[in-house]
Amino acid sequence: MVSVRELRGGLMSNKYCQALVELRNKPAHELKEVGDQWRTPDNIFWGINTLFGPFVLDLFTDGDNAKCAAYYTAEDNALAHDWSERLAELKGAAFGNPPYSRASQHEGQYITGMRYIMKHASAMRDKGGRYVFLIKAATSEVWWPEDADHIAFIRGRIGFELPAWFIPKDEKQVPTGAFFAGAIAVFDKTWKGPAISYIGRDELEACGEAFLAQVRQQAEKLVREMAA
């Protein structure tokens, strides 16, 4: 989810980033502290990529967990950037597993807040490009993207992974079970498909696993060719 980039020149751009750096640097952590930092499982990401990609820009990362070569961190503040211009350069779609923390600002610019993230996505959609978000299936929330061009509801609850920096404080700090019902929101003014669809979590994971298996197969083939 949202992230912290290594400090440049010892400067912290905002309180949100400072809090994340302090959290990462703690000697041990509790699950309740993870907050915005839960990671999208690879098989889920690649499953979504298979259906709605190719993804070339990860909108909310900590750098280390970026799913794409191009990405934004909390210090970059994705909401301060023109995603449409970036996608025009990269030739693909953007993916986001957004932060759900309370809306916060830095120098008048929102850093977090689902309402403002969805608002920015809508504005970028109007400029051009495809923006795909893995979100909670929380249709009663004020931020719910009614103006998304497509919503794919996921049958089966989604589980997320701990960040790489997480050091459990004790044996109780182990996530159990799934997290929440999920949905995939697609902002793309060229979308020609239905407004709503449904996909099973197992099907999504299978798509991702199949893609990853192909990648591993090609990597092994390349290694063999190089060794020959």
Image: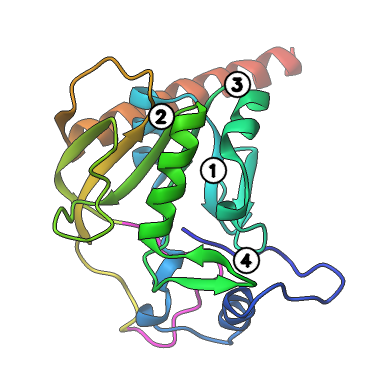
Q: Is residue 217 above or below residue 154?
A: above
User: Looking at the image, can residue 87 be seen?
Assistant: yes
Element at label 2: helix
Identify the magenta region.
160-171
Q: How many C-alpha atoms fall within 10 Å of the one at disc 4: few (<14), some, or many (≥20)?
A: many
Identity, as a three-letter code, of the amino acid under mark 3: Lys
| Residue ID for mark 4 | 4
User: Looking at the image, can residue 67 be seen?
Assistant: no
Q: Position of residue 122 (x, y in %)?
A: 40, 40
Q: Earlier in the sequence, mark 1 or mark 2?
A: 2
Specify whether 197 is left or right of 65. Answer: left
Q: Earlier in the sequence, mark 2 or mark 3?
A: 2
Q: Residue furthest right?
A: 9
Q: How many C-alpha atoms fall within 10 Å of the one at disc 3: few (<14), some, or many (≥20)?
A: few
Of the numbered discs in the image, which one, if any, rests on residue 49?
2
Q: Position of residue 189 (x, y in %)?
A: 38, 24
